[in-house]
Image: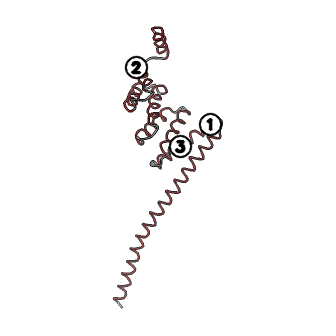
Amino acid sequence: MKGLSLLGFAALLFLFSCSGEDDTVYDEQEDGLEKALTYEESLAAVQDVEARIGESQAPDEELLKEAITKFQDFANSFPDDPEAPDYLLKASDFSLAVKLPEKSVNILNQIITDYPDYNRMESVMYVKASHLDLDLRDTTAAKVAYQDFIDAFPESEMRPDAENRIENISLSIEELAEKFMNELEAQ
């Protein structure tokens, strides 16, 4: 009898230990399902806000800010998704539209850092330099960004513009206009 209760106890112990392994597998499957639902929900939220912007003649600031948040959330939650850098680029564009140029530059930096092989990197790097230059008036950072652009894309059609901005970055609009007029007269 005593041997039978020991055998019963061992069987119960075995069942409970196996049950824990099954729970772990079940928990992993449940986590995967939750992640898939979260992906689907996030993608639906992004597509919804894109559709509302597309339907609007002139999207209001609140809608654009909502889009920025949803695009960044999606890209940060699903960084390996092929659309992630495109959503970040849209978030950067919308940030500039709502007069948040620093946020726009930060998002462009994220693209440069996290997606070095992004197919629109030439544009991303040039736009970053341009925002630093013209919107934030951070001439030191802009010069570095323009030079980084030139180094990364030496054959770019935008290279002469970047070189020109580096050379003339310290000039005011008036000084730049005067220099341009002098160059025209010299020709």
Q: CA distance from mark 2 to mark 3?
A: 37 Å
Helix, strand or loop at disc 1? Answer: loop
Left or right for 166, reference 67? left
Identify residue for label 1. Answer: 60
Q: Which mark is residue 69?
A: 3
Q: CA distance from mark 1 to mark 2?
A: 38 Å
Identify residue for label 2. Answer: 167
Q: Amino acid at mark 3?
A: Thr
Q: Amino acid at mark 1?
A: Asp
Q: Which mark is residue 160?
A: none
For image coordinates 43% across by 66% down, the residue present is 25
Badge 1 vs badge 3, beta-carbon distance below 8 Å: no
State the scheme by which the image is colored: secondary structure
Q: Please state the horizontal and vertical placement of residue 179, each as a whole percent of the image.
A: 46, 12
- Of tags 2 and 3, the one toward the viewer is 2
Q: Which is more N-terminal, label 3 or label 2?
A: 3
For image coordinates 56% across by 33% down, the residue present is 97
Q: Please state the horizontal and vertical placement of residue 16, each as a whole percent of the image.
A: 40, 75
Question: Is disc 2 surrounded by few (<14), some (14 to 19) or many (20+) residues within 10 Å?
Answer: few
Q: Which is more N-terminal, label 3 or label 1?
A: 1
- Of tags 1 and 2, the one toward the viewer is 2
Helix, strand or loop at disc 2? Answer: helix
Helix, strand or loop at disc 3? Answer: helix
Q: Which is more N-terminal, label 2 or label 1?
A: 1
